[in-house]
Image (cartoon, helix red, strand yellow):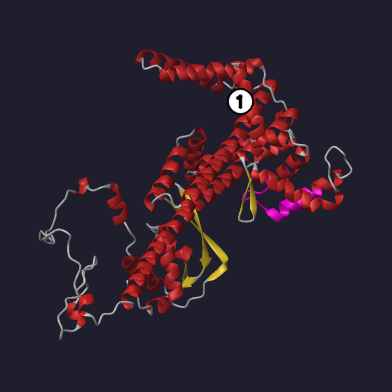
Amino acid sequence: MSQDRTHVYITARTQHPAWVLLASRRAPLVIACLQSIFEEAHDGVLMDDALHSLAAMLAPYANDEHYEIDPARLPQLAGRELRQWIRRSLIIERGGRIYATDALQAAINFVEGLDNRMMTSTASRLSVVQREIERLESGLNPDAGQRVASLERRIAELQRELVAAQAGDVPVLDDVEAMERIREIYTLATGLRADFRRVEDSWREADKVLRHNIINEQRHRGNIVDQLLDGHEALLDTAEGRVFENFQAQLRQSTDLDLMRERLRDILLHEVSERALTQQQQNDLRFLVGRLVKESEVVFQARARSERDVKGFLKTGLAAEHHRVGQLLAEIFQEMLQLDWQQAATRRTASPLPPVAIPIAGIPLIERLRYKSLDSDTAAELDLSQANAEAAALDTEFWVDFDGLDREVVIAETLALLKEQGRPLSLAELAAALPPSHDLETFALWITMAREAGIEIITNQRESVDLTDEESGTWRFSLPLTRLDELSVSAIEWDI
């Protein structure tokens, strides 16, 4: 057992990027530099900015023999350091920008944990473990009687707390327990960002494999699409993928995140927070929701790159097939030109290719061309009979596709509203008077109407429109400033 563990640790010491970084000679300088530049960067860092920051970090330690830094070659040394960690997958370089990975975050967490050992007391951890054991046992037990008893105990406990609160007896946590709870929340919250970073790393690794398959051309285009979709489903089946998916569900209901943000603000305003957390940790917790939103944007950008790669591969693959067919036809035509068609023997020679026209003199070529026939000799008739089906039997995809924007109705309603108001209306005023059922399509149609009518569209000035969807989620649209009037819009000749 100990030998197996030793072998695993030796392998990790030589291959895991975080361990290799921590064991390197310039680890303190590299970690401090990368941590500082990635703290506020949520869409990567420009390679030039990273090189400049690392060179500036190395300069004060040029005379330290331990780090072996040549002051005359700081830019070259910084470039060599960054390229080394890119090769070891500690950071990722793409499009002139570098991105952090979960391995880098693990190294940063290890270094920070050396000074900030936030260990909660045994009593606190024991109570958390006992509570979770009880909830898990209740959730796994199919016995209805025990489930009822467990629920009755919870209700009785809540009833006692309610009676005490109504009587004015509201116990609060003492300082020690409050500090323990705050530190537990901070530990869990920082783990969320690590989960998001692992999701991002997983997407980048899947994107790397996808790119290799595209470049090697060992997969059919349909297989590439299947690999993209299967990779997405497999990622959501992981623990961090489920955390990310649940967070995306909460983004649609911004009220939950707003409440979370307000509660964190109230907790940090308590005087105990200053003793429980350092100033940097308080800032991390204060801006947790915003940073999670930005981390999710980075994950979506990584996924969008994969989708763009697949889309480009599909288009270029189709174009390459057309090009190869054209080359094949050009070679056939070139061989045909080299034949002596004046000789009857040549014209009567059998060919593996079927003739494209019937050899009848005196009839124009266009009338002698052979049309492509079916492979089967059986006559197939086109079935144009009317088919009836129950509406309940139709799939959900049919109704989603069927429920599209009726452009004619929207144009007619817009013209009627402009005529009724007798004045130009902005997009926000149109949305207030005619609540759009298809928000993006309706706004795009109104902007198209303004462009077709020659109405000025001011893109550097915006107006906001808040709409509520069917799931009671609120969406805010930032729209360019323009005003539609009846005279200009009625003059448009629509080709619908």
Which residue corresponds to the image point at 61% horizontal and 38% vertical from the top-left? 102
Which residue corresponds to the image point at 65% horizontal and 50% vertical from the top-left? 98
Position in image of residue 380 (x %, y %): 12, 60
Position in image of residue 178 (x %, y %): 66, 24
Query: Pointer 1: what residue?
Result: 8
Q: Is residue 253 left or right of residue 413?
A: right
Q: Is residue 149 above or below residue 465?
A: above
Q: Quadrant of residue 418?
A: bottom left
Q: Is residue 402 above or below residue 424?
A: above
Position in image of residue 164 (x %, y %): 55, 19
Which residue corresponds to the image point at 35% horizontal and 67% vertical from the top-left? 328
Q: Label 1 sits on what residue type?
A: Val
**Residue 495 can be seen, yes or no:** no
Crowd rating for badge 1 (residues with CA inside 10 Å; few <14, some 14–19, many 20+): few
Residue 305 in magenta? no
Q: Is residue 480 left or right of residue 342?
A: right
Q: Viewer-proximal residue, 462 or 127?
A: 127
Q: Is residue 95 above or below residue 59?
A: below
Q: Quadrant of residue 289?
A: top right
Judging from the image, what secondary structure is the residue with disc 1 in? Answer: helix
Position in image of residue 101 (x %, y %): 62, 41
Q: Is residue 114 above or below residue 144?
A: below
Q: Is residue 73 left or right of residue 232?
A: right
Residue 50 in magenta? yes
Which residue corresponds to the image point at 75% horizontal and 44% vertical from the top-left? 33
Q: Viewer-proximal residue, 307 or 76?
A: 76
Q: Which residues are magenta?
A: 36-56
Quadrant of the image for the N terminus?
top right
